[in-house]
C-alpha cells in the first residue's frame, strides 16, 4: 500500500515569530492565505489523480503553525478535510506546528476532526541554538508538547535542522539522540539553507553566519542517519524538496543545497563500509548490498566506484543481496 499526502500550505499563518532561517512563502511557493474553498478544491483536484485502491491518503496542512491560527479557521479547515474522511475518500489528516502551540484543548480538537499525525518543528534540542535562531520556544517546550501528544492516538513526527546559528556537529548529534529519547514515529532532517528575504540572509551577508558546506552537511548526515535507523525511527525526508524556489536559481542564497542530499549521505555510508571490507581482505573484488541500495553504493555519479579505483588501484562489482540489512556490505565470489 502506497501513502500519499495532499499538501495544503498555510504559509506563516499562526506563527508570530520570524525565525532567522524562515521565509515560508518562498519555501512553500505560496504568497497568499488559504481559503476554505481552496482547501476543498485542492483536495478534490488531488483525488482525481490518485489511485482509488491500495493506497492511504492524508490531507497535510503544512507551511505554517496550524494550531496557532484562530480556532475558528482551524475548525473550518478541519471540517472540510473530515468530510472526506467520513466519505472514505481520504484516511486522515496530518499537520505541522510548533511545540509551544500544543495544549489539551488543541489536541482534543484535532482528535475530534480525525487528525492522524502531528509534526513538531523541534529544529534543535539546544537552547542556545534555539535562541540564536529566533525560535521563541525552548527544549522544555518540546518535551512538554511530546508528553501531551503521547496521551492521544496521533502519530508523532519531529523535525530537526542542522547548521543553524550556534549549532555544531556535536550539538546536532546530541539533538538527534535527545529526539530519539522522545520516541517519535518518524523524523525529518533539514540542513539549513540561507534563503532570500530572511534574517539569516542578512547575517550571512554581514559575515555573522557561516553556513555548512555541502561536504560538512553530508558528513553530519552520514552520522545522523544510522543513529535514527538503529533506533527504528523512520526518516521520511532529508533536506527541503527541490522546487523552482528551493534552488540556486530561486531563493537559495547559500548553504548545502543538493537535489539528492540523502543519496549523497547514504553513498558515504556505503563507501566507508566497502572500504572496511576491502581493507580486511585485499583479494575482494565483488561486494553485495541490498537490491534497492545498489545505486547508493555505487555513489552519486558513480563517485564511489571512482574513489575505490583511485584508492585501491582496482575496480569492484556490486551485486544485490536481499538477505543483507541496510548499509550492510558483504563479499561474494563469481
Image (cartoon, rainbow, N blue to C red):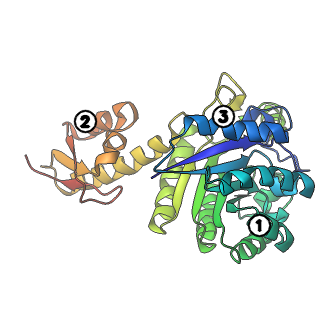
Q: 319 or 174, which is in the foreground?
A: 319
Give the residue displayed 33% in from the left and 46% down from the top. Answer: 292
**Furthest residue in direction front, as rendered:** 87
Residue 31, percent from left and from top = 83, 31
Residue 70, percent from left and from top = 92, 54
One can see residue 256 in this view: no
Q: Residues within 10 Å of mark 3 (few under 14, many from 20)?
A: few
What SS does tag 3 mark? helix
**Furthest residue in direction top, as rendered:** 249
Disc 2 marks which residue? 309
Q: Residues within 10 Å of mark 1 (few under 14, many from 20)?
A: few
Q: CA distance from mark 1 to mark 3?
A: 25 Å
Q: Which comes sooner in the sequence, label 2 or label 1?
A: 1
Q: Which comes sooner in the sequence, label 3 or label 2?
A: 3
Q: Which comes sooner in the sequence, label 1 or label 3?
A: 3
Q: In the image, which is nearer the foreground, mark 3 or mark 2?
A: 3
Res 45 label:
3
Left or right, residue 331 beside residue 5: left
Q: Residues within 10 Å of mark 2 (few under 14, many from 20)?
A: few
Q: Is residue 92 above or below residue 6?
A: below
Disc 1 marks which residue? 112
Q: CA distance from mark 2 to mark 1?
A: 59 Å
One can see residue 180 in this view: yes
Amino acid at each position: 500500500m502506497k501513502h500519499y499526502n495532499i499538501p495544503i500550505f498555510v504559509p506563516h499563518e499562526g506563527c508570530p515569530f520570524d525565525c532567522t532561517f524562515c521565509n515560508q512563502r518562498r519555501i512553500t511557493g505560496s504568497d497568499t492565505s488559504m481559503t476554505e474553498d481552496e482547501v476543498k478544491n485542492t483536495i478534490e483536484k488531488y483525488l482525481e489523480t490518485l489511485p482509488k485502491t491500495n493506497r492511504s491518503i492524508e490531507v497535510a496542512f503544512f507551511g505554517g503553525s496550524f494550531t496557532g491560527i484562530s480556532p475558528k479557521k482551524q475548525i473550518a479547515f478541519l471540517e472540510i478535510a473530515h468530510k472526506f474522511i467520513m466519505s472514505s475518500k481520504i484516511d486522515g489528516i496530518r499537520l505541522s506546528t510548533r511545540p509551544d502551540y500544543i495544549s489539551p484543548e488543541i489536541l482534543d480538537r484535532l482528535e475530534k476532526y480525525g487528525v492522524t499525525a502531528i509534526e513538531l518543528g523541534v529544529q534543535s534540542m539546544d537552547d542556545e541554538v534555539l535562541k540564536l535562531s529566533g525560535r521563541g520556544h525552548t527544549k522544555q517546550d518540546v518535551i512538554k508538547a511530546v508528553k501531551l501528544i503521547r496521551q492521544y492516538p496521533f502519530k508523532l513526527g519531529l523535525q530537526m535542522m542542522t547548521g543553524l546559528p550556534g549549532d555544531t556537529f556535536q550539538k546536532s548529534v546530541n539533538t538527534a539522540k535527545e529526539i530519539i529519547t522522545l520516541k517519535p514515529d518518524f523524523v525529518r532532517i533539514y540542513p539549513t539553507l540561507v534563503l532570500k528575504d530572511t534574517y539569516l540572509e542578512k547575517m550571512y551577508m554581514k559575515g555573522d553566519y557561516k553556513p555548512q558546506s555541502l561536504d560538512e552537511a553530508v558528513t553530519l548526515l552520514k552520522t545522523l542517519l544510522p543513529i535514527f535507523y538503529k533506533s527504528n525511527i523512520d526518516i521520511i525526508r532529508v533536506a527541503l524538496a527541490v522546487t523552482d524556489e528551493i534552488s540556486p536559481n530561486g531563493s537559495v542564497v547559500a548553504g548545502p543545497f543538493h537535489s539528492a542530499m540523502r543519496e549523497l549521505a547514504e553513498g558515504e555510508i556505503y563507501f566507508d563500509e566497502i572500504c572496511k571490507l576491502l581493507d580486511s581482505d585485499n583479494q575482494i573484488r565483488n561486494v553485495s548490498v541490498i537490491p534497492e541500495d545498489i545505486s547508493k553504493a555505487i555513489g552519486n555519479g558513480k563517485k564511489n566506484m571512482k574513489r575505490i579505483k583511485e584508492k585501491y588501484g582496482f575496480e569492484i562489482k556490486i551485486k544485490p543481496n536481499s538477505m543483507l540489512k541496510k548499509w550492510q556490505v558483504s563479499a561474494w565470489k563469481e
